[in-house]
C-alpha cells in the first residue's frame, strides 16, 4: 500500500470501493477519488439542471447557458487546492455531468485537497440553481439547509 492509499484509507470521509478508488462520504451528490501515478483524480457526478426541475421543461437555451457557465466556473477549482491542478474535464452523459479534476502531488496526496475540490464543484453546482423553478427533493433539501444556515447567522 502506498502512502497515498494509506492516507485515504485512514481518512474518516473516505470509504474504499476498490483498489485505488475511494468514495467521498457526506456529499449531496456522488464523489470519489481515483489514485493515478503521481496524481489523484477527483470525480464528481452532479445532475444537469433540467434533471432536477419538477413539473416543467427547462428551455434548451437555458440548459445550454447553465452548463456553459458551470463549466467555466469549475475551472477555478485550482484556487481551493494547494497542489497543482489540471483544468477539470467536464462531460455530460444524459442527465449526469461528470467532472474529473486531476491533482498532481509530490510526496503524497492530501485527502483535504480532494475534499476541497469535490466541495468546490458541488458548491458551484448549488450556486447555479436558478430561482423560479420547482426542484426535486434532493435540491429542495439543499436549498432548505441554505435558508436555515442563513437564518442562524
Image (spheres, rainbow, N blue to C red):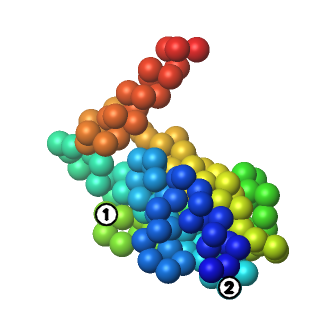
Q: Quadrant of the N terminus?
A: bottom right
Name the residue at the right extreme. 106
Residue, disc 2: 37
Image spot of residue 47 (x, y percent) = 37, 57
Residue at left offset 48%, top offset 43%: 126
Tell me the quarter of the picture where residue 17 sits: bottom left
Measuring from the top left, give residue 5's x and y in whole percent. 62, 73
Q: Which residue is mark 1?
A: 95
Q: CA distance from mark 1 to mark 2?
A: 31 Å
Q: Residues within 10 Å of mark 2 (few under 14, many from 20)?
A: few
Q: Residues within 10 Å of mark 1 (few under 14, many from 20)?
A: few
| Label tally | 2
- Please report the residue visible at 67 percent of the width from the left and 79 percent of the height from the top: 2
The answer to whether residue 20 is left or right of residue 61 is: right
Mark 1 lies on a secondary structure that is loop
The residue at 43%/41% (across/down) is 129
Q: Is residue 91 left or right of residue 119?
A: left
Q: Can residue 133 be seen here? A: no
In the picture, measured across the screen, residue 39 lies left or right of residue 28, that is right
Foreground mark, 1 or 2? 2
Q: Nearer the viewer, residue 25 or 145?
A: 25
* Callout 2: SS: loop
The residue sitting at the bottom extreme is: 37
Q: Is residue 25 visible?
A: yes
The one nearer the camera, 110 or 138, is 110
Pointer 1 or 2: first along the chain: 2
Where residue 29 appears, as percent x and y from the top left, is 41, 53
Q: Is residue 35 depicted above or below 98 in this figure?
A: below
Amino acid at each position: 500500500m502506498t502512502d497515498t492509499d494509506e492516507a485515504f484509507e485512514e481518512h474518516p470521509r473516505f470509504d474504499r470501493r476498490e483498489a485505488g478508488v475511494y468514495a467521498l462520504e457526506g456529499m449531496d451528490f456522488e464523489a470519489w477519488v481515483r489514485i493515478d501515478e503521481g496524481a489523484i483524480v477527483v470525480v464528481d457526478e452532479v445532475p444537469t439542471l433540467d434533471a432536477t426541475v419538477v413539473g416543467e421543461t427547462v428551455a434548451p437555451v437555458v440548459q445550454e447557458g447553465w452548463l456553459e457557465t458551470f463549466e467555466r466556473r469549475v475551472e477555478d477549482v485550482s484556487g481551493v487546492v494547494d497542489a497543482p491542478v489540471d483544468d477539470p474535464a467536464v462531460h455530460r452523459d444524459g442527465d449526469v455531468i461528470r467532472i474529473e479534476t486531476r491533482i498532481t502531488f509530490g510526496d503524497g496526496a492530501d485527502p483535504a485537497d480532494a475534499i476541497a475540490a469535490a466541495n468546490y464543484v458541488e458548491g458551484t453546482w448549488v450556486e447555479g440553481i436558478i430561482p423560479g423553478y420547482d426542484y426535486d427533493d434532493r435540491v429542495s433539501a439543499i436549498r432548505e439547509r441554505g435558508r436555515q444556515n442563513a437564518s442562524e447567522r
